[in-house]
Amino acid sequence: MKKIALALAAVAGIAATGAQAQQNYPNRPITMIVPFAAGGPTDVVARIVTDHMSRTLGQQIVIENVAGAGGTTGITRAAQSQPDGYTIMMGHMGTHGAAPALYPNLKYDPTKDFAPIGMAAGTPILIVAKKDLPASDLKGFIEYVKTNADKVNQAHAGVGSVSHTTGVLFDSIVGTKPTMVAYRGTGPALNDLMAGTVDFMTDQIVNVAPQIQGGNIKAYAIATPERSPALPNVPTTKEAGLGDYQVSAWNAVFAPKGTPNDVVAKLNDALVKALADENTKKRLLDLGGVIPSAEEQSPEGLQKLVDSEVARWTPVLQAAGAKAE
Ligand code: MLT
């Protein structure tokens, strides 16, 4: 009898410690894994929102860039981390939408292996090219790419990344197959685009907007129904004659599956407060980011989005002949 009482007391003690830990959460710095190189769109969105989130949580959020395999290396590491709220991640339409179609042996299921926290930013996609590429409009660019298919090269951030997924979609609609050049993120890819050592890419607005505004790269079109207020002179793909190419990406915060509900709630509260903060909103909007709706900022809304994105991208990528790893 005594042994059972002792065992029960021990279990109760552990449970109490666990509950206590959750109650005090966070009482040490949090790591956010960004699955691409520093300086790219996912890193930029992560640093902007965590800058404010850390103030609400009262703890530093340390960004750890873990690049590779189109973002799946970093997300796999994050998915397998302790579900205690001290390791979270910034995923996106590639890692949590397209990846299952391209990685048959993916070590995580985007729809099951995470505790969604909320969307951080919508990121419209642009078709951008090196400054001295001869074509002055999208029609001319498409002509150029098709005529010079054997020498044109297209940058992306690894199979399954947003730039790869949206790039494959663009190529399949246009009917071309440029040489694909993989980078550890579209931050480094953009450097080569500005240097003229890679010809074009499809990338998220928060990465390319400043360089378009600065005239350092060319933007042929934005693949959303409306123009971006941040880039009013860039035509939509519809206006530019490629209306079939409609695609936008998103970046969102996730924790590993099994993260306690009250920890998820604290992380979501900090994200929602960040996206309500005028300065944080301005930083995202100035880069052409789209502030998510209240539904998209919720864990339930993000779960619904991931479920629909995985279902959407699998047939699209298979039809586009995207090569699985
Ligand atoms: C990045 O941050 O480098 C991008 O999100 C990569 C991509 O998915 O294209």
Image (cartoon, rainbow, N blue to C red):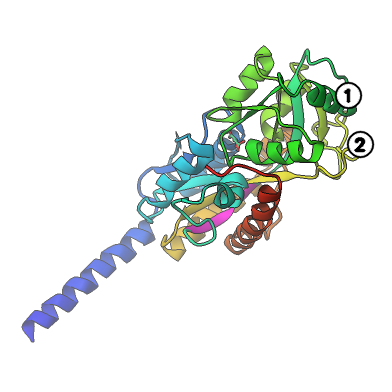
Disc 1 marks which residue? 140
The residue positioned farthest toward the front in the image shown: 150
Residue 176: which quarter of the image? top right
Q: Position of residue 188 (x, y in %)?
A: 57, 23
**Quarter, ligand 1:** top right
Query: Which numbered disc covers residue 194?
Result: none
Q: Is residue 164 above or below residue 208?
A: below
Q: Residues within 10 Å of mark 1 (few under 14, many from 20)?
A: few
Q: Helix, strand, or loop for circle 1?
A: helix
Name the kind of residue labelled 2 in the image. Gly
Drawn side of residue 50 relative to residue 241, left or right: left
Q: In this orientation, which residue lies closer to the viewer: 219 or 283?
A: 219
- Does 254 sit left or right of 21 as displayed? right
Determine whether, in the image, residue 148 is placed left or right of residue 86.
Answer: right
Amino acid identity at mark 1: Gly
Furthest residue in direction left, as rendered: 2
Say which residue appears at 48% left-offset and 34% top-offset. 67
Q: Which residue is mark 2?
A: 241
Report the residue at 46% width, 65% height from top.
261
| Residue 118 part of the magenta-drawn span | yes
- N-terminal label among 1 and 2: 1
Where disc 2 sits, the SS reads loop
Start and end of the magenta stretch? Answer: 114-120
Secondary structure, magenta segment, majority class: strand
Residue placed most toward the observer, 249 or 286: 249
Q: Position of residue 223 (x, y in %)?
A: 80, 40
Image position, residue 2 (x, y; %): 7, 83
Q: Is residue 257 above or below residue 232?
A: below
Badge 2 residue CB within 8 Å of ligand 1: no
Residue 23, position in %: x, y? 38, 61
Label 1 and label 2: CA atoms lie apart by 11 Å
Say which quadrant the N terminus sits in. Answer: bottom left
